[in-house]
Image: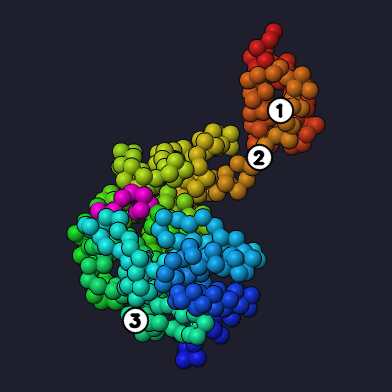
Amino acid sequence: MVNVAAGLSPLMRRHLGEPTLALLHQVGQIASRMGVPFYLVGGSVRDLLLDHAPKDLDLVVEGDAAMLASEVARRLSGQALTVSQFGTASVIVEGNRLDLASARKETYARPGALPRVVASTLLEDLGRRDFTINTMAVALSWSSFGTLVDMHGGQADLRGRLVRILHPRSFVDDATRILRAIRYEQRLGFRLEDETSLRLGEAVAGGMFDTISGDRLRRELDLLLQEEEPLKPLLRAAGLGVLRGLYAPLDGVPGLHRLVGAEQPDDPLVYLAVIASHLTTKENEAFIKRLNLTSRWAQVVRDTISLRPLLGEVASTTSVVQLCHMLDCLSHSAVKAHTLMEGKSAASEKLRRYLAEYRYVKPSLSGRELLALGVPQGPTVGAVLARLREARLEGRIANRSEEVALVGALLKDPSLTGTG
Ligand code: ATP
């Protein structure tokens, strides 16, 4: 971790660049004139202290974010954007967009309920956050620019490489933090602090995920799948019983263990397919419902389950055309998932060739060109295109003129054209 005795300006210069730093200085000055303290907070500060470039800038105003946004737009010839109901406002200055949030605190009517949000001080805002490493702020106001605010021991936990909750009921208040804890732990190579680990286990065992809506769980799972190496947090979640806590039949996730040591796909949906790959059709439908999966995600998990019983046939078929008939209607994420889980088997080899080669095989003649060659309008065009693709897949034809010759032959086939 970086020593910040001199303030965070040098780190901000290094990771945000001079133009962004200058803009933050200007906004800080405007905020100071308005008498509203202005800060960089949360994950951005954590990343700066770890000497990483933050993914985005979390900016908090101890006051009215919308008023600051419109004043910045007025003074710096920028454009203030619509204000959201959660006290956030955005402003664009010379192509740079800044999202400003009013400091706020939250109260929970019951575990897992959406919080009631009210305006607050910075300290209250930081006190509602998930982990100590996300509770630091850097002052951006004119007189204190670059000064670190660390009220919860965030620096010490960064040094100790610990993910630590702020209070014992944190996971009960909001069980999505269970997934967040694992995500940070695995991304940063940290470890769950002892009490945090204990409370996390209690919250999972106590069924706290049941208090969270499918949409919120899906969003948090999505963030986890978007990580650079999702296998790590997924294996950790499986080990801690967190996947089982999310949805009981996910227990065990045999597919996930088969991915260890395999090539890691960069398609996040492959991991989704893998964790659902052992479910029965009925369990899968309940999983889709529980996490309110989007239609695309639902298709991927359904295709993964449908492909499972076909793997024997995939392995044994000697026909590329038959292989494509089985796979063409399935999502590629599902096919990829089985390719990886199958390891070095015959089925895996076929699936691999399908993804790398066969799925791209297409006739070079277009539907329009077929019409010009005398193919009658209507379903025959699709049927001829399918025959051309089959011939290409089987290597019977290899170029355009051979396609034209085959079309000529097919036009004489009454079963295809309906003539004769
Ligand atoms: P990442 O590096 O993955 O972008 P981040 O730390 O910027 O992560 P966000 O999900 O963008 O995290 O959230 C911004 C900040 O809001 C976090 O740093 C954290 O302080 C706070 N936060 C987000 N979700 C929660 C939550 N469920 N409970 C408490 N605080 C949260």
Mark 1 against mark 3, which lies toward the viewer? 3
> Contact (CB < 8 A) between labels 1 and 2?
no
Q: Position of residue 261 (x, y in %)?
A: 46, 64
In space, the residues marked 1 and 3 are separated at their CA atoms by 67 Å
The label on residue 361 is 2
Q: Which residue is identified by label 1? A: 367
Q: Which residue is identified by label 3? A: 151
Mark 2 against mark 3, which lies toward the viewer? 3
Q: Main secondary structure of the magenta part?
A: helix
Which amino acid type is marked by label 1? Gly
Mark 1 crowd level (few <14, some 14–19, many ≥20, 10 Å Cα): some
Which amino acid type is marked by label 3? Met
N-term-proximal mark, 2 vs 3: 3
Mark 2 crowd level (few <14, some 14–19, many ≥20, 10 Å Cα): few
Mark 1 against mark 2, which lies toward the viewer? 1
N-term-proximal mark, 1 vs 2: 2
* The stretch drawn in magenta includes residue 213: yes
Mark 3 crowd level (few <14, some 14–19, many ≥20, 10 Å Cα): some
Front residue (pair 192, 107): 107
Is any atom of residue 271 visible in this view? Answer: yes
Q: Residue furthest top?
A: 420
The stretch of residues the image draws in magenta is: 211-218
In space, the residues marked 2 and 3 are separated at their CA atoms by 60 Å
Which amino acid type is marked by label 2? Val
N-term-proximal mark, 1 vs 3: 3
